[in-house]
Image (cartoon, rainbow, N blue to C red):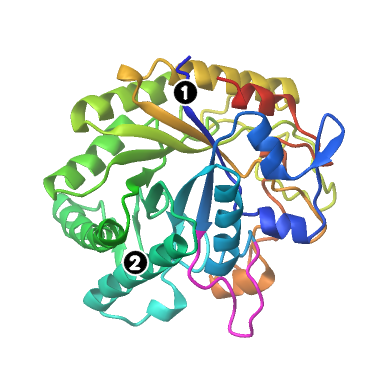
């Protein structure tokens, strides 16, 4: 196992969890989440930033309500404890992922040129603010899971024809160029471009070939790898090997996770994204059980596969939200958020709690110790 592998965690919901009374325990001893993570080998924190995660009445969106001030305080906290920082710009007021990439309220109605300027200014101003406050990140993500583009529909990738794809990628590249230019002007942080579907080599080749043709400026390929959606460990590693050979960039897994149980923390709401009835796309059951033992086994096999990546160029693995406990008020989205993003048909609640590295009572799961150990 490579001894210099960065072990990280996205802990963006932590301030909200703590404010809602969430507590964490390591072998029965209560401690702060970040202190427990550090004690067991986690050396880096990933923190997302949303533009304006509040409705027009000032009601918050949930999911950590990751505004600049709250995330700056968290960034300073972890930096003061010696952790490195990966700052993740979503360029939205709320979640960005393959299914949604919303334009911030303040940017709606802008021309494309105005939107590029707004993205540049938001990146430069926010990053400069973090740096001036003693929370300079070592890594900066320009966009989050942008496999299908960003700031929809302005730069949503259109795969209906080769011509449509090229035109839509031109718009996406211009927005990314605005963000990366801002990063270079104020910081020496390494720039991360983040995709998901990390077992889909053809998809990644299409994307990064288009990026290479346009001279896209970045240092690291960031990946989400969730084995329940993104293929086998072998498919992931073979894709990474190809990316390294083809584009000469290091790789970081900036998101991963796996359930430790299939039992719902709220049997009536049944809010979990992954429950006992989950099957893979082909109808089969997952390789690892949804138990604490199965979660730890996944971590062990993931880290072993990471060690096999070409030339040791897999540099980091971040667990996504290891401490998002199911407190009473915990939710991926408030009703106000669902209204603002046009998803009022969906439920609220904590969908992620069974994919943490802590059980529903805040007790460290065995996988934490496996994850942090090199």
Q: Nearer the viewer, residue 349 or 248?
A: 248
Q: Quadrant of residue 371?
A: top right
Give the crowd class for mark 1: few <14, some 14-19, many >=20 residues within 10 Å.
some
Q: Main secondary structure of the magenta part?
A: loop
Left or right for 156, reference 208:
right
Residue to which mark 2 is pinned: 124
Q: Quadrant of residue 2?
A: top left
Judge whether 226 appears above or below 321 on screen.
Answer: above
Across and down, in percent, residue 125 comes to 38, 70
Q: Tell me what residue is drawn at x 79 percent, y 60 percent.
A: 20
Judge whether 156 appears above or below 22 on screen.
Answer: below
Instruction: Examine the rendering and report whether any part of residue 349 can be seen.
Output: no
The span shown in magenta is: 49-62
Judged from the image, the secondary structure of the residue bearing numbered disc 2 is: helix
Residue to which mark 1 is pinned: 232
Judge whether 100 appears above or below 147 on screen.
Answer: below
Residue 122 in the magenta stretch? The answer is no
Left or right for 140, reference 347:
left
């Amino acid at each position: 196992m490579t001894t210099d592998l960065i072990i990280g965690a996205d802990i963006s919901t932590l301030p909200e969890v703590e404010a809602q009374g969430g507590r964490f325990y390591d072998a029965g001893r209560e401690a702060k989440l970040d202190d427990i993570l550090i004690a067991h080998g986690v050396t880096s924190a990933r923190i997302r930033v949303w533009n304006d995660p509040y409705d027009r009445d000032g009601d918050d969106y949930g999911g950590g309500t990751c505004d600049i001030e709250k995330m700056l305080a968290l960034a300073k906290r972890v930096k003061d404890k010696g952790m490195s920082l990966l700052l993740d710009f979503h360029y939205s007021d709320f979640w960005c992922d393959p299914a949604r990439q919303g334009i911030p309220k303040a940017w709606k109605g802008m021309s494309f040129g105005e939107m590029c300027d707004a993205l540049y200014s938001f990146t430069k101003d926010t990053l400069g603010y973090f740096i001036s406050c003693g929370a300079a990140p070592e890594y900066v993500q320009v966009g989050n899971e942008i496999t299908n583009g960003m700031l929809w529909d302005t730069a949503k990738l259109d795969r209906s024809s080769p011509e449509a794809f090229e035109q839509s990628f031109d718009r996406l590249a211009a927005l990314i160029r605005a963000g990366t230019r801002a990063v270079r002007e104020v910081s020496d942080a390494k720039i991360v471009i983040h995709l998901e579907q990390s077992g889909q080599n053809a998809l990644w080749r299409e994307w990064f070939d288009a990026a290479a043709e346009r001279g896209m400026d970045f240092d690291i390929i960031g990946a989400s790898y969730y084995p329940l959606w993104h293929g086998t460990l072998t498919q992931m590693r073979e894709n990474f090997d190809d990316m390294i050979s083809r584009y000469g960039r290091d790789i970081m897994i900036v998101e991963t996770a796996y359930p430790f149980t299939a039992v719902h923390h709220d049997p009536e709401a049944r809010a979990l994204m992954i429950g006992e009835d989950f099957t893979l796309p082909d109808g089969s059951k997952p390789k690892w059980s949804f138990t604490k033992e199965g979660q730890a086994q996944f971590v062990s096999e993931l880290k072993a596969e990471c060690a096999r990546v070409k030339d040791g160029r897999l540099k980091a693995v971040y667990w996504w939200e290891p401490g998002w406990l199911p407190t009473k008020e915990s939710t991926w989205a408030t009703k106000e958020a669902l209204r603002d993003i046009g998803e009022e048909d969906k439920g609220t609640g904590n969908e992620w709690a069974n994919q943490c590295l802590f059980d529903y009572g805040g007790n460290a799961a065995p996988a934490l110790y496996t994850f942090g150990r090199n």
